[in-house]
Image (cartoon, helix red, strand yellow):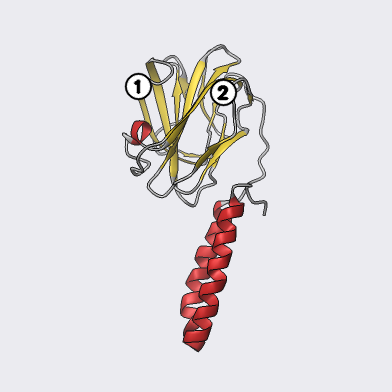
Amino acid sequence: MKLHRESKGTITVATILFIIISVLAIYFLKMWSLLIIMPLLVVYSLVFWFFRVPDRNILEHRENVIAPVDGKVVMIKEVDETEFLKEKAIQVSIFMSPLNVHICRYPVSGKVIYKKYHPGKYLVAWHEKSSTENERTTVAVETVTNHKVVFRQIAGYVARRIVFYCNEGDQAKAGHEFGFIKFGSRMDVFLPLDTEIICKIGDITKGGLDVIARMKD
């Protein structure tokens, strides 16, 4: 199983803690040490599972808006996007549990024209105010169909580290990685009002594979 590059520090710390606690359990608890070691082993294995990188066949897309993450669609509504678009847009929000793959992917193809990191709170990721009050990043892409699309990584109650690798002027390719969020979190995508929304609330998405909307060419 391939692991994400963001896993190195977390797995190193987890390995050291696992070894130390296991040795102490064996030394002090003897035959009862398995009561500590087995649950700890499950948690240790979940750390590896969280940082997995699935092998996915990413296709080329023009009008399609691709699910940027693995997760569950929790919101589809018309909102005012006040940071970059400064106009009404359709917001599609996808929540990621700690068990989901947490690679963040471009939802559309085009050119990166804006990026910004915002420090903030750590409300639960499905809270509506987390989109504007939590630690987050905002990226805007001018698509190959001449639309402007904004998407936002949002830290959740557990997530405390967001990374994004893109820079203004980069070419965005729908379905390809641009960042990562550690543990529970959410992504919002803001689309033009005339976008055809294909997904619905409650849908389970596969990042880079599922089409969630389609824009007019």
Residue furthest to the front: 119
> Toward which corner of the image does residue 10 lie, by quadrant?
bottom right
**59 to the left or right of 163:** right
| Rendered view: 211 above or below 135 | above
Q: Nearer the viewer, residue 73 or 52?
A: 52
> Where does the image place residue 195, in percent across and percent down from the top left?
46, 18
Instruction: Determine the residue positioned at 47% across, 51% down.
Output: 98
Q: Amino acid at mark 2?
A: Asn
- Residue 198 visible, this angle: no
Q: Nearer the viewer, mark 2 or mark 1?
A: 1
Local secondary structure at mark 1 = strand
**Residue 194 image label:** none
Q: Residues within 10 Å of mark 2 (few under 14, many from 20)?
A: many
| Rendered view: 130 above or below 168 | below
> Where does the image place residue 110, in percent across and percent down from the top left?
61, 19
Q: Which residue is mark 2?
A: 64
> Toward which corner of the image does residue 122 lie, by quadrant?
top left
Q: Which residue is mark 1?
A: 78
Q: Nearer the viewer, residue 171 or 60?
A: 171
